[in-house]
DNA sequence: CGCTCAATTGAGCACTTTCAACGCAAGTGG
DNA sequence: CCACTTGCGTTGAAAGTGCTCAATTGAGCG
């Protein structure tokens, strides 16, 4: 549970926002706030560590908090009554969690690897947001980006083949991690997670990866590190 | 092309916002604006009629405008290079179009039936939005709702069977149109459109509908009017 | 009446899934 | 230190769902 209070946070105001440790510094919206406002934010913030596999919150739970991811990787997912799971997104540091909520969370969130989030109580965060239009505007921009990404995923799930899905997934990960030709792509999530994200079975993911490997598009030193031999071919396979 | 200027719009200010004809009245956000602000909005607004099948804008075109739908129905879609199409959403009157845009539209928009939109120049609209935080807040709320809906669709496309997809689609349409047991659901879009929305072929949509019909869940007086015999069974088939 | 276009239905096939087994690496306990 | 277990990834063979291709029906319209 390891919930730490604002220990390293108070320093933010005094030292004019340069403490690297402060979780607030790492969040989404810090660029749009003045130091005094950052300090205000810090007062309702708390860091929390999550071990790999640990659940941050369940789908349907009352949404008391919003978060930003400061380290690690999270997966968001929905589950049907009979156990089918769909991962709706993987989050990287800097991502904000809490845009799509009403009274309760519309998806569950779980740590893929050891992670750290910065938690804000929902109510005071929203009040602060309303007092600072720049913060609100920043979130609107993030929401727009998220909608565009969701629609790209809808195209993938609705109209792409298994091969194209895997290629699209890898290509998108390359872009987020800024990996180019010959670069090492970190793939911390399991094959099952990948399958649940792109709408296929584990075995299909594995098969397609093996195939792309045999064809020389990529190499897999370990299951969780993928070397990209040709980003161009990967992009072609992804079908924009 | 039928672009009408602010003819019926000017009245909005003088008569304290009660003219039913005014396109601005119909938009998303009117509830969050005072009469003077509505008037401001009206100055950058223009109504436009669209015939069924007419394109409002293409994917990738420079995004000069945002819109609200005032009458009819629009479909939003993306197309792959080799012609596969995915419809990302159907819009009903009151819906806002323009949240997910950067410099260019990330999807195309086309009228399903004869429709009417209210157009706003993007730049002045954003300026006005920045001057009126309540407007911005309203749009943020809409964006949240849209993200939640997109994730529901992602679950559908990634993990549901053809039968569940059709049932989910119909059930969602029932809720949006407020149709209950015995009610007539209006389905103005073609079977092809439905298939491109739920990620199946036309034939599959047709087959599943025929099946549900034979099973007594629904009836189809015409292809575009569906009578719901048991909303409960439809909901069961949809698998939440 | 013949045309066109949408919807429906049928039959065969293909891709993905399902079911099952195996290899491998890490962790555990004697 | 080694047998055993456990979890994950991979591979194979069989099965099935939804797709492709093709033909038929039906409604709207000149």
Image (spheres, coloured by chain):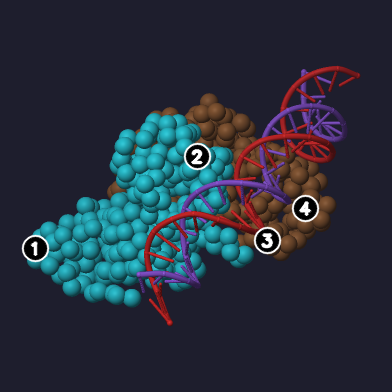
Chain colours: A cyan, B brown, C red, D purple
* Residue at 19 percent of width and 64 percent of height: A22
Disc 1: which chain? A
Disc 2: which chain? A
Q: Which residue is mark 4?
A: B212
Disc 4: which chain? B
Residue B81: percent from left, percent from top: 51, 29
Q: Spatial distance from mark 1 to mark 3, Cα to Cα?
A: 57 Å
Nearer to us: label 2 or label 1 = 2
Q: Is residue A65 left or right of residue B175?
A: left
Q: Spatial distance from mark 4 to mark 3, Cα to Cα?
A: 13 Å
Q: Which residue is mark 1?
A: A15
Residue B62: percent from left, percent from top: 39, 30
Q: Nearer the viewer, residue A9 or B46?
A: A9
Q: Circle 3 — which element?
A: helix
* Residue at 53 percent of width and 26 percent of height: B1
Q: Nearer the viewer, residue B22 or B16?
A: B22
Location of residue B10 by image quarter: top left
Residues at circles 3 and 2 in contact by the CB criterion of under 8 Å: no
Q: Circle 2 — which element?
A: helix
Placement of A16 over or under C8, stated as above or below? below
Q: Spatial distance from mark 3 to mark 2, Cα to Cα?
A: 40 Å
Q: Which residue is mark 3?
A: B235
Q: Which residue is mark 2?
A: A211
């Amino acid at each position: 549970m390891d919930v730490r209070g604002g220990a390293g946070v108070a320093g933010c105001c005094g030292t004019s926002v340069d403490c690297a440790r402060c979780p607030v510094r790492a969040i989404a919206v810090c660029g749009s706030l003045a130091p005094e406002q950052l300090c205000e934010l810090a007062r309702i913030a708390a860091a929390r560590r999550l071990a790999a596999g640990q659940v941050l919150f369940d789908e349907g739970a009352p949404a008391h908090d919003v978060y930003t991811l400061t380290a690690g990787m999270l997966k968001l997912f929905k589950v049907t009554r009979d156990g089918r799971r769909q991962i709706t997104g993987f989050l990287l540091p800097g991502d904000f969690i809490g845009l799509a909520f009403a009274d309760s969370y519309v998806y569950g969130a779980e740590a893929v690897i050891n992670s750290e989030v910065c938690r804000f109580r929902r109510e005071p965060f929203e009040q602060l947001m309303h007092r600072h239009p720049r913060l609100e505007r920043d979130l609107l921009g993030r929401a727009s980006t998220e909608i565009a990404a969701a629609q790209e995923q809808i195209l993938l799930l609705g109209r792409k083949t298994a091969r194209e899905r895997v290629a699209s997934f890898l290509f998108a990960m390359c872009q987020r991690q800024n990996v180019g030709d010959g670069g090492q792509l970190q793939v911390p999530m399991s094959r099952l997670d990948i399958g649940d994200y792109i709408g296929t079975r584990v075995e299909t993911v594995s098969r397609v990866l093996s195939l792309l490997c045999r064809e020389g598009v990529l190499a897999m030193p370990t299951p969780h590190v993928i070397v990209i031999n040709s980003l161009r071919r990967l992009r072609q396979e992804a079908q924009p």
